Image (spheres, grey):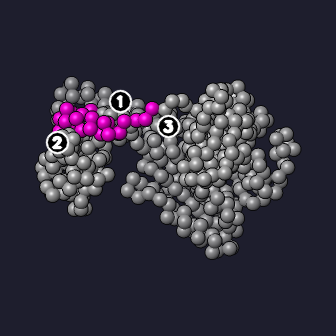
Amino acid sequence: MKAVIYARVSSKDQEKEGYSIPAQKKLLKEYAHKNNFKIVKEFIDVETAKKSGRENFGLMVDFLKNDKTTNIILVEKTDRLYRNFTDYIIIDELYATIHLVKENEILSKKSKSHTKFIHGIKVLMAKNYIDNLSEEASKGMREKAEQGIYPSCAPIGYVNCAKNANGRTLRYLKPDKIKAPLINNLFELYATGNYSLSLVVERGYNEGLRNRNGGKVGKSAIHKILRNPIYYGEFRWNGVIYSGSHTPIITKELFKAVQDIFNAQNKPKQTKRQFAYTGLLVCGQCGCAITAEIKKNKYVYYHCTKFKGTCNSSYIREEILADKLSTLVKRININNKMAELIKNSLAKHHSADIKFHTAKTKGLNIQKTKLENRLRKAYLDKLDGKTDEEFYNNFANNYNDKLNQIKQSLEDIKNNSDYYLKNGLQIIELCNKAYPLYLQQNHFERAQLLRYILSNCSLNDVSLCPIYRKPFDLFAKRLSRTNWLPREDSYLQDKFDL
């Protein structure tokens, strides 16, 4: 039987942790030989900071569509093949048989419905795991920010610079000799209160301020500049303000004066009362927001804002709306038997990762001990006069860098080893208890739960049309038996009393 191989790594960290392409190819080729598969094509994707995307994944899909004699995909495990639920749908439409070698699982159109269901859960958990890796990749930038180093491209008025110190490359911001004075002029002009943003834009252009492409710096870009604290010595990164180590272009007092001008122009409107379900629903007839008002000083009614004009949608009482919203929560509910089935399956397939992380941790600890022993010996040699100061410092810097890399790898393994399973179990637990929890809560707590599981919901008179967030949409579809039970649509219902 003909088969194709697909292997992927998505970061340098994964390469270091043993997910290397050669390791994946070796595993898959051994599996193919053992099962008498003929490998006709290999598709490899390597995603780096400079090159993202999966070109060869698309080529593999095209190949399988055109070559009807090949319908077997060999891949290491779920998160090597899929990055998101869209990838799952693409592969599912190929009618191919997928061999997840490390997970010891084979999936095809003939697979039982509950096997497909649990595999879909694993696909979504893999997506969450990939998102977590992305968060880990940003950790280094956050550490730079905490050190006062702006971890991105320099804004207009600054340039990115680098210098070598003790064998390391240190990057920092330096004021642009030409543009920095022009940025200072923009702040001084706007702080007077006599210039609009449009006039500031024209003034900056006339004085020679240009963007990176040599063009005019637009109104929105000028607005961002005047709102950016980086110019007085602080910077915002991922919603947090850090104290920068770079040279300020303006004073903090000048920046505050500009912000006072903005704040005076954009005073927020005060609302008299908050309603639980506003902001959660849109009108199913015209698409406008659903708002609320009080009748007879005690009854809350929800209705369309009719912002676009005439709308024939009717009013609905808050109690009736809450009751109808409860059915949306009930759709994702799973009973105790199904919850235990999914939990056990996730734990079973996670055991392979646990073994791998344990072995990897053991190997890294051995390397860590060796490096620490060599550092200790080198230090004793320096004390005994066997090595000079310069040789020891170079040696120690090199080995300390390696030690820090190993410690970081150990920390990453510790943080990531249980993430996949813990996150999956938390989602299963919520689906198991969401409905009774909803019934016990007040309207505001119910709305908070609904915002967690829904990305959008339209109200058409008294009918609701929800769009669930992932992975809750999977449970909602499973209960409606329109996706996960295409052939055996009564299997789970009979077996688990769904």
Helix, strand or loop for disc 3? helix
The residue furthest right is 494
**In front here: 294 or 283?**
294
How crowded is the residue under tag 1: few (<14 C-alpha within 10 Å), some, or many (20+)?
few
Q: Nearer the viewer, mark 3 or mark 2?
A: 2
Which residue carries the number 2 mark?
A: 188
User: Alpha-carbon neighbours of circle 3 within 10 Å: few (<14), some, or many (≥20)?
Assistant: some
The residue positioned 74% from the left and 48% from the top of the image is 478
Where does the image place residue 370, in percent across and percent down from the top left? 39, 33
Q: Amino acid at mark 3?
A: Ile
Say whether residue 256 is magenta: yes
Q: Which residue is mark 3?
A: 413
Q: Which mark is residue 373?
A: 1
- The residues colored magenta run 243-270
119 displayed left or right of 242? right
Give, as a three-letter code, the residue at label 2: Glu
